[in-house]
Image (cartoon, coloured by chain):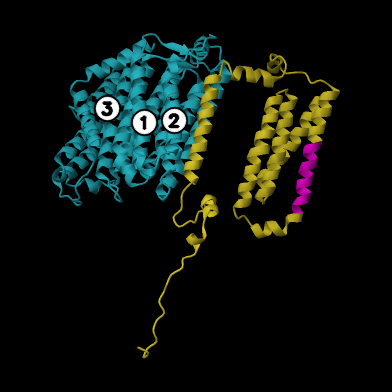
């Protein structure tokens, strides 16, 4: 068994285990963290296939953005919030394990590729240089039309998100700093001249 | 193919630019001046229609590395999309004003969903089909949810979003299978791959099943119809009108391009699948519509049944069938626009005219609108001399020519069942006493457009040949005949 196959089985085992834990762990935060591990391991697989762009995109987009958002949502929803707080310490072993495993994986991939060049699969060999460059060059030439449409889809997503969440509530007190700065004493204080009442029977 | 020819996508560029301009202009408008955005949208549609019709060319033009095609078929379908979107805006102005939906975002999202439909109609590559579909669907999900105070609308938006995402996923999965089998996403290259038999046939058929399922979701035919009644019912009526009309033309276009152009070599296989879908839709749609007391739900089941009839044209799988299906789609869109137009007309501030009972005695309240609704119902039921009759007649004819007499018999039986619930509305309007006697108020332009729309159903019913001729010519010039 060569190094490549050994690495593959190592990552595959972690990936399968992490994926299993995502669905079996009782705590949504644990699940999310295991999912992070699963994504990292999948990215390692892609790196071994020399699809480095996809691997980086997976880590950046899924681990960096989607999972963070996911964790936000999990924590915003009131899922056993008291339990979460009381068991805060108990996450440290899980988090640390995941973190260490991710580090080890990254180290193994980087060291593995330095130690022995991986034979490229047939498809990847066609791309000269990095496949990030190859993807970029077709994306902005041959496929510029769907690329632009994708940009429009994102614009629609932004507009839709604002339309669905932004509203002016009635009765909400908004502050206008400009008005606050320009305020004068007479806007705040009104001096009224009220004649004193005459006492009964004094007339 | 290194030169960048922007002429074929000029209408798309116009719509995109206009949507961005309206988005910016709207920010600076005071609340009382929202109609500026409205009229800008209408003017955009007018200019696009003019461009689309004047730049029509006999030969299909491929652009952007053959990702986009500009042919007579796409020009014609786009024209009818502009028409139905414009009619939707005309009919729903009063309704949207009364419900706080008359906002710049409504117009912008409408234009973006129109852009998505245009991209779908002009697609010449699976990627383009998918991107157009997503753009159209995403805009519509947001529009369904825009009426936030309504629980029904939120529920409808959620269902539409989840099921729509599932459908997109299935379509994408099918596309990836076809890509795996033929090594290309270009429609012509896939067609060549299928015909030469290079591709793995099992893989192709596997992909085909998913593609047909995805398309069936978008058309809303049984057994992928679950979203239709809830979304039609829950969405604000103008949005229902939008969902029920122009996207059907876009769905027709991608069905034609994906099944006939790209996977024409598998016609025998998809013919059978579509036959089952069409049969189930006609039977289930027409039967369940009888039990509905809400007109939006009834029209939703009517849509399911009508899409079943439209698919009969694809079951025939010959030039006559395709032109009949195209005629059916256009006739259906013209009729549906008018039907929701009347529902919108009867609604007023704080009152939705979406129950069948709201149509009681309409003849006494307004004979003219009762007559227009009569034309709409006759057209949906397929009673001459309306356009719906000729549409049904041509699809039945196409099916019978291919030897599926039994299919035509079943279709006629189901349309007889359908006639019951369409004519029930006519009975309610003409022979019952009105429950609601509030005067019908509407804007002059709404009345004018809705009257023209209603009369068009009659006109195309008496003289169907010009429109039918247009469909045949469009398909012939676009290489389908």
Question: Which element type, helix, strand or loop, lies under badge 2?
Answer: helix
The picture's colour for chain B is cyan
Q: Which chain is yellow?
A: A
Distance from Cα at disc 1 to Cα at disc 2:
9 Å
In this view, the mark in front (3 or 2):
2
Locate residue B210, reporting x and y percent: 50, 28
Distance from Cα at disc 3 to Cα at disc 2:
52 Å
Neighbor class of circle 3 (other Cα within 10 Å; few <14, some 14-19, many 20+) is few
Q: Is residue A51 left or right of residue B410?
A: right
Count all numbered tags in the image, as a single digit: 3
Badge number at residue B40: 1
Residue B202 visible in the displayed image? no
Please check the rendered image and state whether residue A97 is part of the magenta-colored stretch, yes or no.
yes
Q: What span is colored magenta in the figure? A: A90-103
Q: Residue at x 36, y 18 (%)?
A: B51
Question: Which element type, helix, strand or loop, lies under badge 3?
Answer: helix
Question: Which element type, helix, strand or loop, lies under badge 1?
Answer: helix
Distance from Cα at disc 1 to Cα at disc 3:
48 Å
Q: Is residue A139 left or right of residue B254?
A: right
Mark found first going from the N terminus, 3 or 2: 2
Mark found first going from the N terminus, 1 or 2: 2
Is residue B478 placed above or below A5 in the rendered structure?
Answer: above
Tag 1–tag 2 contact (CB < 8 Å): yes
Locate residue B450, reporting x and y percent: 24, 34
Q: Nearer the viewer, residue B95 or A45?
A: B95
User: What residue sits right under mark 2 in the picture?
Assistant: B21
Q: Are marks 1 and 2 on the same chain?
A: yes
**Which of the 4 image quadrants contains residue A192?**
bottom left
Locate residue A57, reporting x and y percent: 67, 30
């Amino acid at each position: 068994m060569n190094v490549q196959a050994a690495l593959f089985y190592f990552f595959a085992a972690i990936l399968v285990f992490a994926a299993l834990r995502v669905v079996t762990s009782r705590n949504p935060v644990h699940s999310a963290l295991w999912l992070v591990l699963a994504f990292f391991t999948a990215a390692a697989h892609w790196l071994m296939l020399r699809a480095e762009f996809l691997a980086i995109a997976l880590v950046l987009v899924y681990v960096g953005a989607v999972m963070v958002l996911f964790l936000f949502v999990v924590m915003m929803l009131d899922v056993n919030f008291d339990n979460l707080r009381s068991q805060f310490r108990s996450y440290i072993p899980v988090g640390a394990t995941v973190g260490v495993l991710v580090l080890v994986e990254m180290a193994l991939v980087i060291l593995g590729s330095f130690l022995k060049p991986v034979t490229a699969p047939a498809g990847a060999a066609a791309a000269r240089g990095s496949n990030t460059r190859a993807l970029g060059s077709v994306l902005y030439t041959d496929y510029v039309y769907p690329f632009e449409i994708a940009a429009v889809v994102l614009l629609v997503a932004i507009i839709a998100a604002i339309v669905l969440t932004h509203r002016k509530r009635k009765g909400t007190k908004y502050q206008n700093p400009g008005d606050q700065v320009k305020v004068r004493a007479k806007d705040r204080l009104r001096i009224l001249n009220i004649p004193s009442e005459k006492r009964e029977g004094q007339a | 193919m290194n030169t960048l020819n922007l002429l074929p996508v000029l209408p798309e560029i116009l719509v995109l630019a206009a949507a961005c301009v309206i988005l910016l202009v709207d920010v600076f408008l005071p609340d009382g001046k929202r109609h500026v955005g409205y009229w800008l949208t209408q003017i955009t549609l007018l200019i696009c229609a003019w461009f689309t019709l004047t730049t029509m060319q006999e030969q299909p033009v491929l652009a952007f590395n053959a990702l986009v095609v500009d042919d007579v078929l796409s020009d014609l379908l786009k024209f009818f999309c502009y028409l139905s979107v414009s009619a939707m805006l005309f009919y729903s102005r009063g309704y949207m004003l009364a419900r706080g939906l008359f906002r710049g975002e409504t117009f912008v999202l409408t234009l973006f969903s129109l852009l998505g439909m245009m991209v779908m109609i002009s697609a010449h590559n699976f990627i383009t089909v998918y991107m157009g579909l997503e753009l159209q669907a995403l805009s519509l999900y947001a529009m369904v949810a825009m009426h936030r105070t309504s629980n029904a609308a939120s529920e409808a938006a959620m269902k539409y979003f989840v099921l729509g995402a599932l459908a997109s996923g299935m379509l994408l999965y099918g596309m990836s299978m076809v890509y795996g089998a033929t090594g290309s996403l270009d429609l012509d290259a896939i067609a060549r791959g299928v015909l030469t038999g290079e591709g793995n046939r099992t893989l192709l058929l596997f992909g085909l099943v998913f593609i047909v399922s995805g398309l069936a979701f978008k058309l809303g035919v049984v057994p992928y119809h679950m979203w239709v009644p809830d979304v039609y019912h829950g969405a604000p009526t103008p949005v229902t009108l939008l969902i029920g009309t122009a996207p059907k033309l876009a769905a027709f276009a991608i069905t034609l391009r994906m099944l006939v152009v790209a996977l024409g070599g598998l016609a025998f296989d998809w013919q059978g699948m579509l036959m089952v879908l069409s049969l189930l839709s006609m039977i289930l749609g027409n039967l369940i519509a009888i039990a509905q007391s809400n007109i939006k739900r009834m029209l939703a089941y009517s849509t399911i049944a009508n899409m079943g009839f439209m698919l009969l044209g694809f079951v025939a799988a010959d030039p006559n069938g395709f032109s009949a299906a195209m005629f059916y789609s256009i006739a259906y869109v013209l009729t549906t626009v008018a039907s929701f137009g009347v529902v919108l007309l009867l609604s007023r501030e704080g009152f939705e005219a979406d129950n069948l009972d709201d149509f009681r005695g309409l003849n006494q309240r307004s004979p003219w609108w009762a007559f227009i609704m009569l034309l709409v119902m006759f057209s949906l039921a397929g009673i001459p001399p309306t356009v719906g009759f000729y549409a049904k007649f041509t699809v039945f004819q196409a099916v019978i020519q291919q030897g599926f007499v039994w299919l035509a018999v079943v279709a006629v039986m189901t349309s007889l069942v359908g006639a019951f619930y369409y004519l029930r509305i006519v009975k309610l309007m003409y022979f019952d006493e009105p429950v609601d006697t509030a005067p019908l108020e509407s804007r002059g332009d709404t009345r004018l457009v809705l009257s023209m729309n209603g009369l068009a159903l009659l006109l195309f019913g008496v003289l169907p040949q010009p429109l039918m001729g247009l469909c045949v010519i469009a398909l012939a010039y676009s290489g389908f005949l």
